[in-house]
Image (spheres, rainbow, N blue to C red):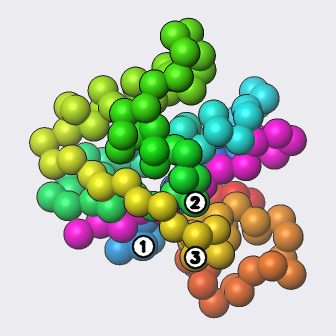
Amino acid sequence: MITVYTDASGEPHNIYGYCISETKEEKFIRSKYRLGSMEAEFMAIIEALNSNTVRNSKQTIIYTDSESIVDFITRRVHKPRGSIVRLLTIQILNIVDNLENKPSFLWIPRERNLAGILIEDEVPKKINKRMLFKESLLR
C-alpha cells in the first residue's frame, strides 16, 4: 500500500505538492502563477495522481487536510459550469477513472499532514525536524 500526503499553500506562496511515506518521494512545485488555496490543493492531488508510484500502486490512500477537496472528489460534487474548481474536479475524476487501481481519498487533520509540515519548511519553529525526509525539494 502507498500512503500519499498532499498539501498546498495558495497566495502568496503558491506552493503545492505531495510526499509518499513508503518511498520517501517528494515533489513540491512553486508556481509562478497566482493560485487560490483550493486551486493549489487540487494541483497537489493532480501531481500525486500523475506520479509513477501512484500509477503503479495496487492500493493507494491519498490524504489531504482539505475536507472540501475530499467532498468534491468522493461525492463527485459539482460546482457551477465554467468554475476552476469544477474543471479541476473533472480533471481529477478523469485521471482516477483511467487508473486500474482506484485510490482512496481521505481527510487528515492539518497537524498530521506530512506534506503540510514540509511546506511549512519556511517557518522552522513549527516543524519537528525528525519528521522530515532527508531531502526536501522546497529549498
* Mark 3 secondary-structure assignment: helix
Residue extending furthest bottom?
130
Q: Which label's residue is closer to the chain start, 1 or 2?
A: 1
Q: Tell me the residue at 35%/74% (across/down).
A: 22
Q: In the figure, 19 relative to 91: above or below?
A: below
Sequence-first tag of 3 and 1: 1
Asked if the stretch drawn in magenta spans residue 13, the answer is yes
The residue type indicated by label 3 comes to Arg
Place of residue 48 in the rendered image (x, y in percent of width and height, measured from the top left): 43, 48
- The label on residue 112 is 3
Residue 23, quarter of picture = bottom left
Give the alpha-carbon distance from disc 2 to disc 3, as whole Å: 9 Å
Q: Name the residue under label 2.
A: 65
Q: Name the residue under label 1.
A: 21
Q: In this view, does 4 lie to the left or right of 129?
A: left
Q: In this view, does 76 lie to the left or right of 35?
A: left
Dot 2 or dot 3, earlier in sequence = 2
How far apart are labels 3 and 1 at the CA level?
13 Å
Q: What element carries label 1?
A: loop
Q: What stretch of residues is rendered in magenta?
A: 1-14
